[in-house]
Image (spheres, rainbow, N blue to C red):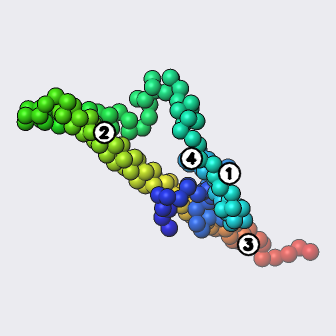
C-alpha cells in the first residue's frame, strides 16, 4: 500500500508478517520526521476541526526573518539550482528582448519576470523530485525490512530444523548404543 505525498509519514513498525522487529531494530522508529507532523488519532480529529488554527500575520512573518538566514541560502535544498535557473532565464530573455529592439526598462522587466518565473518553476520541479525520491526510499526501506524479517525467520527455522535433526541423531545413537540385554 503506497503512501500519498499529501499524508504525513506513518510510524513504521515491524514489516507485515513479522512477529517481532528485526534484531537490528530495538524499537520501531520514524525514518523521516517532519516538523509539526505526528499521527492523528480519530478522537483528536473531531476536536481539531472545532478549533481554528491562527494564521500568522505578515508582520510576524517578517519579524521571523533573521539576517543570518541570508547567509545560509546555499544550505536550503533546491535553492541553488532554482536561483541559477532563474538567473540564466532572466539573462537570456532580457538580452533577447533588448537585442530584438526593446528599450532597456522593458528588457529589464522581461528579465525580472523571466528570473522570477524560472526560479519558481525550477523550485517546484526540484521539490517534487525530492518528494518522489523520499517516497521511493521509504518504499525501499520497507521492502528491505520485510526481506530482513523473512531472512531472519528462515534462519530461525533452519536453526530449529538443524537442532531437531541433531537431537534425533543423538537419540538414534543412544538407541544404537543401548544394550540388548539387562543385568537386573
Secondary structure type for disc 2: helix
Distance from disc 3 to disc 4, alpha carbons, whole Å, reads 65 Å
Q: Badge 4: few (under 14), some or many (20 or more) residues near its Cα, within 10 Å? A: few
Distance from disc 3 to disc 1, alpha carbons, whole Å, reads 47 Å
| Residue 89 seen | no
Q: Badge 3: few (under 14), some or many (20 or more) residues near its Cα, within 10 Å? A: few
Give the residue displayed 23% in from the left and 35% down from the top: 109
Secondary structure type for disc 3: helix
Q: Between label 2 and label 4, give the one nearer the viewer.
A: 2
Horizontal side of 87 relative to 124 (left or right) equals: left
Looking at the image, is 71 positioned above or below residue 59?
above
Mark 3 / mark 4, whichever is N-terminal: 4
Tell me whether the residue at label 1 lies in contact with that at label 2, contact meaning CB atoms closer than 8 angstroms.
no
The residue indicated by pointer 1 is: 27
The residue indicated by pointer 2 is: 116
| Residue 124 seen | yes
Amino acid at each position: 500500500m503506497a503512501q500519498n505525498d499529501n499524508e504525513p509519514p506513518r510510524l513504521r513498525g515491524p514489516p507485515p508478517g513479522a512477529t517481532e522487529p528485526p534484531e537490528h531494530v530495538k524499537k520501531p522508529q520514524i525514518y523521516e520526521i517532519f516538523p509539526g507532523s505526528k499521527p492523528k488519532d480519530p478522537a483528536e480529529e473531531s476536536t481539531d476541526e472545532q478549533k481554528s488554527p491562527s494564521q500568522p500575520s505578515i508582520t510576524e512573518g517578517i519579524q521571523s526573518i533573521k539576517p543570518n538566514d541570508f547567509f545560509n541560502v546555499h544550505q536550503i535544498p533546491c535553492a541553488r539550482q532554482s536561483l541559477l535557473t532563474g538567473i540564466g532565464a532572466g539573462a537570456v530573455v532580457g538580452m533577447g528582448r533588448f537585442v530584438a529592439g526593446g528599450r532597456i526598462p522593458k528588457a529589464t522587466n522581461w528579465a525580472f519576470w523571466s528570473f522570477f518565473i524560472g526560479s519558481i518553476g525550477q523550485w517546484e520541479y526540484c521539490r517534487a523530485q525530492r518528494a518522489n525520491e523520499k517516497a521511493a526510499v521509504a518504499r525501499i526501506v520497507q521492502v528491505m525490512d520485510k526481506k530482513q524479517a523473512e531472512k531472519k525467520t528462515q534462519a530461525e527455522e533452519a536453526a530449529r530444523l538443524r537442532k531437531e535433526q541433531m537431537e534425533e541423531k543423538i537419540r538414534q545413537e543412544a538407541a544404537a548404543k543401548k544394550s540388548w540385554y539387562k543385568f537386573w
